[in-house]
Amino acid sequence: MIIRAVIVDDEIPARDELEYLLVKEDRNIKIIGRGQTGEEAVQLCNTLKPDVLFLDIHMYGMSGLECAKKILKQGFSPIIIFATAYDEYAVEAFEINAIDYILKPFSEERIRVTINKIHHLLNNKDVQNEDIFNAITAIQEDKGIGDKIGIWANERFILVDKSDIVYVEAQRKHTLIYTISNQYECTIAFGELEKKLADRYFFKVHRSYIVNLNHIKEVGIWFNNNLSVVMKGYEKNKIPVARNQIKSFKQIIGM
């Protein structure tokens, strides 16, 4: 039986390596699509209807977890195999019959186990999308620890106190977290981090910036009533306030 697979990973070498190992281990696996963003994964699943989706968790923009939930909401249910370099995601929720994960760097032995599981699942399609959806939600919720946020930065897993975060900046492929004492370049998606900081002390002043209201030093007024924010400890960096956020921002800080 031919197994039609799609691989989505924002790192081309990882994508190529996974394809090589899969085809080497099982010649019945045919890679019918490749992508590098969550949006591409959704599109590929809608158009190609693969049997299996290999999905990187850490991608710029939409994370693999968010992408999987979006695909499942649309009613199509490929077998989902998550790929990640970080084993903090290897929690019990992954072990339900509908989901598997593989750690980077990939090993032939682990790929072999995954392929065996794929064959088993294809022959026993008795798991509902709701079960998979709930498992992914559990994984997302499991990553936070109280008032701390777990991030991978510089090949280390770091727990950061929310109260120590001064502001967050989105860049093309990374998210920068500025704290009282350090700066971290991490792989967590900006949108995912925004959800983790969804409380009254944080405010998204711009599509690329979230600030901790407790660490604002001053607010500057530019021409045409545009605003900029200066944060404590980072006085040289002026953070713009988007025009559509100015009214709400002024209200929340009592300006």
Image (cartoon, rainbow, N blue to C red):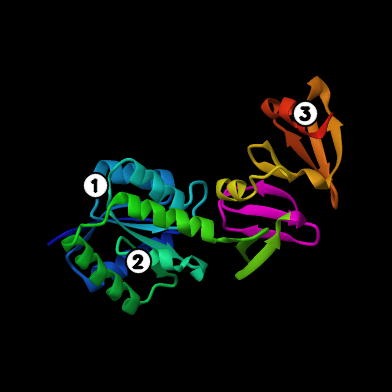
Can you identify the residue that label 3 sits on? Answer: 251
Residue hosting label 2: 18
Magenta residue span:
163-190
Image location (x, y in percent) of residue 145: 62, 62
Q: Which residue is mark 1?
A: 49
Q: On screen, 5 above or below 203?
A: below
To which quarter of the image does residue 20 belong? bottom left
- The tag earlier along the polypeptide, 1 or 2, is 2
Q: CA distance from mark 1 to mark 2?
A: 20 Å
Going by the numbered disc 3, the residue's amino acid type is Gln
Neighbour tally class for label 1: few under 14, some 14-19, many 20 plus, Cα within 10 Å: some
Q: Position of residue 129 (x, y in %)?
A: 31, 50
Residue at disc 1, secondary structure: loop
**62 or 197, which lies in front?**
197
Closer mark to the observer between disc 2 and disc 3:
3
Labels 2 and 3: the sequence-earlier one: 2
Front position in the image: 3 or 129: 129
